[in-house]
Image: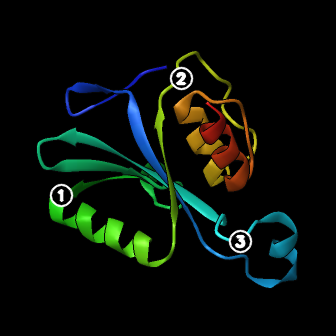
Amino acid sequence: MVSAAGGRHIVHWKIWFYGQPRGAWERLWFKPGFRHCIAYTWIDTDRWLELDPRLPRLGMRVLTGPQYVRRMRALSRLGAYSVEADVLGGARRVPRLATCAGVLAHVMGSRPVMLPHALYREMVSL
C-alpha cells in the first residue's frame, strides 16, 4: 500500500505518541505517554501532511513549514515519543475499531493494533 499526496508517493512517516491517561479506567488501558498518536509526512517544499484521526475529514490537514515547526515544538514540550516509519506495503483490512493507533497501523501497512503503545512496539520492532 503506497499513499500519494502532493504528486508524490508517501513512503516515510514520523509518528508521535503522547498524552497521559485520565482517570482509573484509562489507566487500565493506556500506558503513560501513550494515550494518543498522530503522524506527519513531508509532501512538498514547504508543506507537511498531518494524519490525526481525531480531526474531521478523515483526520488529515496540510501544514506549512512554520505550522509544522510549531507543532513539533509543542509535541516536544509535552514529552512526546516519536518513531520514524516507512510504509510497509501490502493491503491490510480496515480496522474494525477505528482507534488512532488502528488507523495509523492501517496506513503504515502494519498488523492491526488498537492501542498507541502496541503501535509503538510494532514500529520499533521493524
- 3 or 2: tag closer to the N-terminus: 3
Residue 27 position (above or below residue 65): below
Residue 105: horizontal and vertical position, in percent? Answer: 61, 38
Check disc 1 and give the amino acid type.
Answer: Thr
Residue 3: horizontal and vertical position, in percent? Answer: 39, 27
Task: Give left or right: position of 29 versus 81.
Answer: right
Check disc 3 and give the amino acid type.
Answer: Pro
Q: Residue furthest left?
A: 45
Determine which residue is flagged by label 3.
32
Residue 92: horizontal and vertical position, in percent? Answer: 64, 23
Nearer the viewer's eye, disc 3 or disc 1? 3
Determine which residue is flagged by label 2.
88
Disc 1 from disc 2: Cα separation: 27 Å
Is 95 in front, or is 87?
Answer: 87
Determine which residue is flagged by label 1.
64
Nearer the viewer's eye, disc 1 or disc 2? 2
- 1 or 2: tag closer to the N-terminus: 1
Task: Give left or right: position of 17 versus 125.
Answer: left
